[in-house]
Amino acid sequence: MTTVSDNNPSTAGRHTKIPPMNKIGDEFRSDERSKLGVGWHQYTHPEGKVYFRYKNVYTDAWLLDKNTLNTLEAAVAMLCRRLRRVRQDTDGPLLDNIEIGIHLTSQDSDKSGLKGWFRRDKGDPVVKGCYHLCDMTKKEVFWLDEVPAEIFWEDLDHNVVGRQHLHIAAEAAYWEHIYIFPHDRTISQTELHDLREKLAFWTFDAGSSKASTSPYTATELKDFSRIVGNIIADSKRPEDACIVGKLKGALLKIRFAYFFGEEHAQINNSRGVFPHHHDPEHHSYWFRFLNCLSFYTAASYYVNLNHLWIGRKMSTSRWNDFVIQLQDDWYDAITPATVILAANLSFLAISSVDDSGLPPAQRSLGQIVSYISLILNVGNIAASTILARQHRSGHHSSFEGEPPKGGPRKKQLHELERLAVIFSIPATFFWWGLLTFFISIAWICFNRTAQPTRYTAVVTIVLSMFLLLLVILYTYRDNHRSIWADLSALLPLPGFLTCSTSQKRSSSQDPQDQSNNGSIHKGELQTLDTHLDLPV
């Protein structure tokens, strides 16, 4: 039987042949579990990850490797010494109430460009790692070093405003710790009752408000409530601890993000605490040019992209709703493009238009413009299909296209402009294809035709343009109320186009947010990284 001694399953450590009766010898890695250090116990997370425990110390490092075990035990000893000093100096927490989580950087990290293992000198080997400490009485995570505030949520650029605000974030990290190391945990009836009440409230809030701050949809929350209702209190099943830890951690993270219990708490998802850095008068020149080329469709998408952020946090549910709207726009653009494509082919088939006796160099203006319209509509169909495939919706509002990272700060406005232009490409193809088709039809109406025909065409075109202008003004009046009020004072506009004060007041009070059909905040619970040099 051929084997390799490496522990990496992707490169080695695989049995290429299985002996009779599955009798694998003592030289294989499966029997190395008996070499685990004294007092250490091995557990397997419900998701499949192996971790180890010694009393109140937890780690995901592979302790079956002797060097890793020695390194980790040295790190634990150092942390315990520091905890005792803190206890003596400031009457800190008792060690019996503290759980320690440690993650060590593997030696393979050098291959990825991360220098995790290094030596200061020949006699002092040093390893980089990260740790977190859990006060099981206060249900908080803390550190013995100064750490940045974004350690609680890397994607959230946001400061801690007070001790209570910090407690919410630290408690969320505590439940993440429970989720990472779920074995031998007891979920009390009080904790289950608290989680059920929160799920009931969020279900009501998500189902009754389009601007809900819930991280889940009402349907998802109902499913979670049913699952939590089946959990038995005071059981030590690791699956139960995982469920409760992940849900409570996610809900507490949302409270932290929206300043729960603070003076400026954000109670809906339509108005953020931090202002947007959006100034439509300072677009780049290339965006202004392409925006005009797209008949101001790019500007519309740019505004929608800007509203994906609530202050400094991007709303995933808004991104999901925005992508669904994009899909509708792109699919809706394919049908009229197909109609115009067929109309162009029919137009060119008219004998008076396509005189096959003429050489190609003498094709008429109507024919050339109709050919251009054909090309533009084919481009519309192709662009719509490609973009729609790239941004597909699926179960739990998951998308192949990832939302843009970060927030709408000034340094990122060019990225939003680029996205807005890309999303408006199908509409740009459509409008120019429609315009060129109109030019080809107009050429037929005015080229070598009788006066009555021309007069009839002019009246029809003017009337159509007037009605189209009314539609455009009615569509954009909400975005240009001051200009519209001045225009209403000068011209006798129809009643349905007037803009009253009551309409202004009511529209300003409505939350300009899409329904929270949102996505699950995955909140993958990983070891919180605080770099610490751990001498062996």
Image (tube, helix red, strand yellow):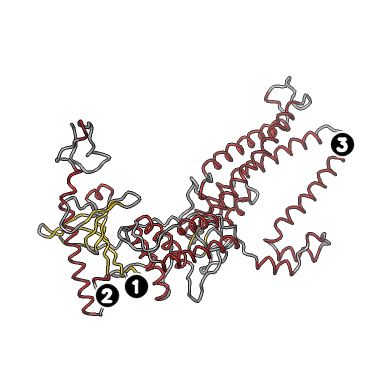
Q: Residue at x 67, y 31 (%)?
A: 371
Which sits in the foreground, 527 or 409? Answer: 527
Q: Which residue shows up at 18% across the image and 31% down it?
A: 1
Percent x, y of residue 417: 54, 53
Left or right: where 508 falls relative to 273: right
According to the image, label 3 marks what residue?
Answer: 453
Looking at the image, residue 16 sits to the left or right of residue 470; the answer is left
The amino acid type of the residue labelled 2 equals: Pro
Near-viewer residue (9 or 34): 34
Few, some or many residues within 10 Å of mark 2 (<14, 14–19, 20+): some
Residue farthest toward the left in the current orientation of the protein: 123
Q: Dot 1 surroundings within 10 Å: few (below 14), some, or many (20 or more)?
A: some
> In the structure shown, which secondary structural element does the residue marked by tag 3 occupy?
helix
Estimate how packed mark 3 is, as few (under 14), some (14 to 19) or many (20 or more) residues with alpha carbons within 10 Å.
few
Q: What element carries label 2?
A: loop
Q: Which residue is drawn at 43% across and 60% down?
A: 247
Residue on which the image places disc 1: 138
- From this view, report whether residue 318 is shown above or below residue 458: below
**Amino acid type shown at disc 1:** Lys
> Disc 3 marks which amino acid?
Thr
Name the front one of labels 3 and 1.
Answer: 1
- CA–CA distance in space, label 2 to label 1: 10 Å
Q: Do the residues labelled 2 and 1 touch (CB within 8 Å)?
A: yes
On the image, which quarter does residue 510 sit in?
bottom right
Residue under numbered circle 2: 93
Image quarter in which the C terminus is found: bottom left
Task: Locate residue 100: give its quadrant.
Answer: bottom left
Q: Nearer the viewer, mark 3 or mark 2?
A: 2
